[in-house]
Each structure stands twice: as structure tokens, then as C-alpha cells.
């Protein structure tokens, strides 16, 4: 059916979405770009500040560090979950599906507060450890970078599971049998055949998680307690809580360009269909 | 992992399967199968899909455990030895090459698993690449190769570590006719060169007859007959084997009587004499004759030939041979295949004599 439609008609079907994206994102973003070059005075002053201001620099580096750690942690755990989901027994598969989908359906805000209830000084973990006599002073688990990383990793694991599981599903079982028949141990098959055949999924998962993590706002704001500000929160603070709109706009532009480059890279490595499983 | 002392030893193995059975739930995939695979032979497991031939190959490989029975290799019980410790070469349907490794790396894999030195690996891989005619393709990924080339990589990878047994699961099913014949010759040559025991699974009877030193015919999970290609083709033990191995004419006989090493019966009031190749029970049987063993003539025939009258219904031209479709007086249909040069095309509706030498017909029971 789709084959019979001329290209112009197909574009017509996309028109409502394009119109919405244009009006709601592209036009306002052009305004943001304009601010970054004109506020408070015309020129490249804000971009200069962006690369010299120690506060902005520290937020950039923190964001990068958190995103890298979160990506590594999410990928590791997602790999294990995807493995059980794809290759486990039927009970294990159901359990894995439950663990992937249930958090997926719960709002990011609810989950951030949930982790706060677990990790804060008077939260579940500290209370339990103290009452068991293992520690006397509460551990600093929330309102710092650690809390942010835990919350973000938990949120992002499902997004990493889908592309990894998709790559695992497309492995030909006979290839693994062939390796066994040639005398390879399970460990060797896993590291020299299975894992390399999932590299595509891993790269896709890494890019998705990393790009997502770069723009995280709610989770760092709640679990970081204002002490580990990430770049999205910095933009918010600049625009809404200070008159410094120009710097906020310049940070946004740099972030969008950086993410654009990452997405372009992602297109080179994997087909979009692989991302959804 | 118990290291077998035979790793890397090119000595061919002999395998005895003793009363192997395999059930999947209520389904009997294999029933009480006993088969001796001789050292260095080329054994083909032949049968329609679902006949149990692939299940048996998977049991030989160690990927599937039999429900009952034992497997003995060179006098040693290997029933419970896992696939990775049997170290047989295997060529899978669809080749199962490692898609992320180059031709060279694919072939080197089993050698790396065995911890060979890199100099040794380089030498062996080089030899194998040359032997299967893949020189110049060493650095390519499997996806960049044609079907025939992938097949060669699969063969090289399965043979490079000099396994005592090579198992092949329908390796040619994805190839076109010309390439298939080329690869068949290639496999035959590799068998002669390596001297390894080959066990080959196929559902293609002409492939089985062309390649094997022996053919084992399977149906419904049972091993029906094992023998040299000529034996199973010309002296099939039952009707399924006779029909599965190629087209065959079946003439119901009455008043069957046995005369020494010959049997004789009546078909449309003519006496048909056949070789007695199997013990007969009862007095009903069919005469079975291959289409290429019959000839069409005008009535003159010697005493050592059987002859019946037929009417020609049509002919199919195959180039080198022509196949005539005929019908006997009482309506039994026959096919006769003759070299095209030996005869001018016979027109439909012509009445003819069909004859065949006494020694080329055989008896089959009516049932089964």
C-alpha cells in the first residue's frame, strides 16, 4: 500500500508532526540561539565565558563524568538483564521482563523520590545499617553525586536493555553451537563470539543512555540536592533564577550541537529499528 | 575439561551407535537405532525431513543427548562426553560462520581454542585456505563472500584441526545446481585427502548416491537400510527405500512362486521372472523396476528379458534422456527412461512392448 503513494503524499502524512516540531522546538530554539549571541550585548562574549568561566567548566566536567559513569553502569547491568531476558528459562524471562517494564512505566519524579527515601540520611538503607549496628553515622548516599548516579542509572537501564537484547536475539544459535563443536569453553564463546556479535547493540545503547543522561534534570535536582548541579540544571538556574539569559542560551546551544553530533554518530553505527528491540 | 589425547590427531575414528532412542515429549524422533560407522568411511544419512537423520547427527555431535542407548567411539563410551570435548568437525546448514571474524580468523578459531602457537596457526590456516581455493580472500568478512565461498570457509574451519570425524548437516541445500555439484566434488576430494570419517546428512537422494561410501536411509525415526549406494538403489529392502531413492515402476504380481534364486509371478497374463533378493513371505508381491532399466521395443525379446504390452501416453524430453509415460492394458502407469539418441520420438497412443532384463527387476512386499 505504501508503495503506491507518491513521495509528496507521504510527506503530507508527516506534516502535522513536522509543523508541531517546527513551531514548538525549532522556532523557539532559533530564539535561544539569537539570545546566545545578543544578550546582554551582541558578540561572542557568552561563548568566551562558557569556555573560561570556572563554574560553567566545573558543571560541564561533572556532567561529563556523571554521564560516563552512568553509561558504564547502565550498560553493564542492562547486559546482564538482557542476557537473562533473551536466553534465560521462561520463568527467568518473565522476571526480567517485569524488572524492565515496571520501572519503565513509573514516572521519573516518583522514582527520584523513591531513591531519596532509600538513600537519604534517615532513609531505609542508613536506618537499617544503623539499627543493625554496622555503622554509627549515616553514610552520604543522597544529596551528592553518588545519589545522582544511582537514580540516573536506574532510570536509564531499560533504555539500554532494548538495543542490547535486540542484538542478542539476532545472533544465530548455530554460530554458538559451531564454537562449542570446535571445543570452545562457555567463557571463551561468551567473550570471543557472543559479546563481539552484540557490539552494535552496545554502541547504540551507550549513545542512547549517554545522550539521555546529558539532558537529565529532575533526577540530579532531587538526588543531588543542589550540590551536584548538572548542565541542564545550570541552564535552568541561569534562565529562571538569574538575569543571565545569554549564558544559559549559549550553554543550551553547545549542548544541542554536542548531542546532534552524537546522534549523527549513532546513525552511522546502528539502524533505528535496532533501538526498539 | 578433560583433554582427549587425540586432539589434533588426524586418525579417523570409528563410531558404534547402540540402540539409540530419542523422544521429545511424546514424539519419538529416533527409535532403537544401531549403526556402525566405519573408520574413514563417507556415510550419508538420508531421509525426508522429520525422519530423524538430523537428530542422529546432533546426537553424534554431542549437542543432543540420546534418551536411550550408547555411543561408542574407538571402544570408548562417549555418550556423556559434551560436544566441546568430542572435537569433531562440523559444517552446519547455513554454514554458521562467525560473522565478525575474517575468513582467516574463522579458520584459525578452532586452532586458537586448542592453544596452538601463532606460527603453527598461521601455517595451518595458510595451507587450508589454499586447499579450499580461497587464496586472496583471507581478510574478507563472511558477508562479503558468495555462498560457495562461505561453504569453503565452513569446510576449512571444520577440517583445519584434523578432527577424527567430520559431520555435515545439509551443507549444500542453499547452493544452486552447478555450484552444488562443484562443492560435492570438493567434499569428495577432501574426504579422500584427509581420510577422516565423514557423516553427511541430506534429503537429496542423488547427492547421497553420488558422494557416499554407504547410505543410511531414515524414515519416521527408524533406520530402514544401510548399504553401498548401488546396493540400496538396486536392492532396496522395502518399498519406502525403493521409492525414496528414485522413481520406480511397481507391477503387482499374482500367483507368485519361488524357483531357486529366481521368483516368478503373473502380471496381465504374462509371466514375470525376477531375482530373489529378499526372503518372501506370502504369495503377494510387486515387481519393482527402475525406469532406466526398461526399454521400449516392438516385440522381439530374448528369453532373459521380461516384456509387457503398453500404450505410450506421452514423453518428456530431458536432453540426454527422454522419459516415456506409458499405461499397461489394465491401467498401471509406467515410466521408461531411455537415452535420447537410442530412439526416435515415439508418438502417443502407439502400442509398444516394454522389456527389461530379468536380473534388474526385484521383488517388494505389497504393503509398507
Image (spheres, helix red, strand yellow):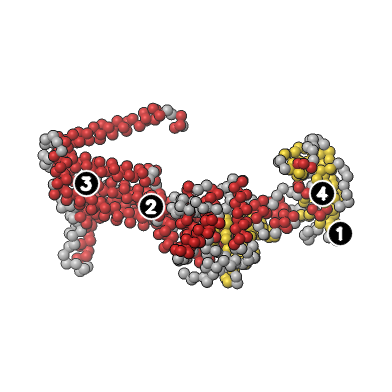
Q: Is residue B254 left or right of residue A257?
A: right
Tag 2, which secondary structure? helix
Which residue lies under the disc numbered 4? B356
Q: Quadrant of residue A234?
A: top left
Q: CA distance from mark 1 to mark 4?
A: 19 Å
Q: CA distance from mark 2 to mark 1?
A: 74 Å
Q: CA distance from mark 4 to mark 3?
A: 91 Å
Q: Earlier in the sequence, mark 1 or mark 4?
A: 1
Name the subunit of mark 2.
A
Residue A189: where, in percent of width, then height? 44, 60
Q: Quadrant of residue A247?
A: top left
Tag 3, which secondary structure? loop
Q: Is residue B262 left or right of residue A3?
A: right
Question: Viewer-nearest of labels 2 and 1?
Answer: 2
Residue A13: where, in percent of width, then height? 37, 30
Which residue lies under the disc numbered 1? B259
* Labels 1, 4: one chain: yes
- Residue A16 to residue B304: above or below: above
Name the subunit of mark 3.
A
Tag 1, which secondary structure? strand
Which residue lies under the disc numbered 3? A217
Q: Is residue B230 visible?
A: yes
Amino acid at each position: 500500500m505504501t508503495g503506491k503513494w507518491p513521495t509528496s503524499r507521504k510527506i503530507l502524512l508527516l506534516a502535522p508532526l513536522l509543523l508541531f516540531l517546527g513551531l514548538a522546538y525549532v522556532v523557539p530554539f532559533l530564539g535561544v540561539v539569537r539570545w546566545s549571541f545578543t544578550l546582554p550585548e551582541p558578540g561572542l562574549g557568552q561563548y568566551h565565558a562558557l569556555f573560561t568561566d570556572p563554574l560553567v567548566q566545573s558543571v560541564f566536567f561533572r556532567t561529563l563524568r556523571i554521564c560516563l559513569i552512568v553509561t558504564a553502569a547502565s550498560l553493564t547491568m542492562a547486559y546482564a538483564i538482557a542476557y537473562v531476558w533473551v536466553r534465560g528459562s521462561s520463568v527467568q524471562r518473565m522476571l526480567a521482563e517485569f524488572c524492565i517494564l515496571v520501572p519503565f512505566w513509573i514516572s521519573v519524579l516518583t522514582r527520584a523520590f523513591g531513591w531519596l527515601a532509600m538513600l537519604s540520611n534517615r532513609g531505609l538503607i542508613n536506618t537499617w545499617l544503623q539499627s543493625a549496628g554496622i555503622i554509627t553515622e549515616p553514610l552520604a548516599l543522597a544529596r551528592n553525586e553518588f545519589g545522582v548516579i544511582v537514580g540516573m542509572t536506574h532510570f536509564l537501564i531499560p533504555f539500554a536493555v532494548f538495543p542490547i537484547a535486540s542484538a542478542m536475539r539476532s545472533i544465530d544459535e548455530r554460530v554458538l553451537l559451531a564454537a562449542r563443536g570446535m571445543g570452545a569453553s562457555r567463557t571463551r564463546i561468551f567473550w570471543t563470539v557472543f559479546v563481539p556479535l552484540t557490539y552494535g547493540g552496545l554502541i547504540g545503547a551507550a549513545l542512547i543512555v549517554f545522550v539521555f543522561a546529558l539532558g537529565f534534570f529532575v533526577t540530579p535536582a532531587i538526588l543531588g540536592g543542589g550540590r551536584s548541579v548538572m548542565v541542564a540544571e545550570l541552564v535552568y538556574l541561569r534562565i529562571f533564577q538569574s538575569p543571565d539569559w545569554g549564558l544559559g542560551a549559549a550553554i543550551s546551544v553547545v549542548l544541542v550541537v554536542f548531542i546532534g553530533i552524537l546522534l549523527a554518530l549513532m546513525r552511522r553505527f546502528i539502524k533505528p529499528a535496532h533501538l526498539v528491540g | 575439561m578433560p583433554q582427549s589425547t587425540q586432539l589434533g590427531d588426524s586418525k579417523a575414528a570409528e563410531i558404534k551407535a547402540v540402540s539409540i532412542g530419542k523422544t521429545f515429549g511424546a514424539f519419538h524422533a529416533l527409535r532403537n537405532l544401531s549403526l556402525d560407522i566405519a573408520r574413514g568411511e563417507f556415510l550419508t544419512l538420508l531421509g525426508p525431513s522429520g525422519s530423524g537423520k538430523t537428530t542422529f547427527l546432533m546426537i553424534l555431535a554431542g549437542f543432543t543427548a540420546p534418551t536411550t542407548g550408547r555411543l561408542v567411539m574407538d571402544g570408548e563410551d562417549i555418550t556423556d562426553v559434551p560436544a566441546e570435548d568430542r572435537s569433531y568437525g562440523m559444517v552446519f546448514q547455513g554454514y554458521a560462520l562467525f560473522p565478525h571474524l575474517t575468513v582467516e580468523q574463522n579458520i584459525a578459531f578452532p586452532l586458537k581454542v586448542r592453544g596452538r602457537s601463532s606460527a603453527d596457526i598461521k601455517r595451518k590456516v595458510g595451507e587450508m585456505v589454499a586447499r579450499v581455493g580461497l587464496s586472496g580472500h583471507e581478510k574478507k568478512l563472511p558477508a562479503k563472500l558468495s555462498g560457495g565461498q562461505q561453504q569453503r570457509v565452513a569446510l576449512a574451519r571444520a577440517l583445519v584441526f584434523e578432527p577424527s570425524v567430520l559431520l555435515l548437516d545439509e551443507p549444500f541445500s542453499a547452493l544452486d545446481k552447478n555450484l552444488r555439484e562443484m562443492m560435492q566434488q570438493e567434499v569428495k576430494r577432501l574426504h579422500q585427502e584427509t581420510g577422516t570419517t565423514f557423516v553427511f546428512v541430506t534429503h537429496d537422494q542423488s547427492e547421497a548416491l553420488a558422494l557416499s561410501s554407504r547410505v543410511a536411509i531414515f524414515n519416521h525415526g527408524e533406520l530402514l537400510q544401510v548399504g553401498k549406494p548401488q546396493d540400496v538403489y538396486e536392492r532396496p529392502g522395502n518399498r519406502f527405500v525403493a521409492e525414496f531413492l528414485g522413481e520406480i515402476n511397481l507391477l503387482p504380481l499374482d500367483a507368485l512362486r519361488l524357483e531357486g534364486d529366481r521368483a516368478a509371478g503373473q502380471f496381465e497374463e504374462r509371466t514375470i521372472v525376477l531375482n530373489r533378493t529378499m526372503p518372501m513371505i506370502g504369495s503377494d508381491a510387486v515387481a519393482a523396476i527402475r525406469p532406466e532399466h526398461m526399454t521400449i521395443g516392438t516385440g522381439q525379446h530374448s528369453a532373459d528379458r521380461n516384456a509387457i504390452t503398453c500404450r505410450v501416453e506421452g514423453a518428456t524430453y530431458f536432453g540426454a534422456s527422454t522419459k516415456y509415460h506409458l499405461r499397461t492394458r489394465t491401467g498401471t502407469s509406467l515410466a521408461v527412461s531411455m537415452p535420447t539418441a537410442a530412439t526416435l520420438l515415439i508418438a502417443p497412443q502407439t502400442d509398444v512392448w516394454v522389456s527389461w532384463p530379468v536380473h534388474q527387476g526385484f521383488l517388494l512386499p505389497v504393503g509398507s
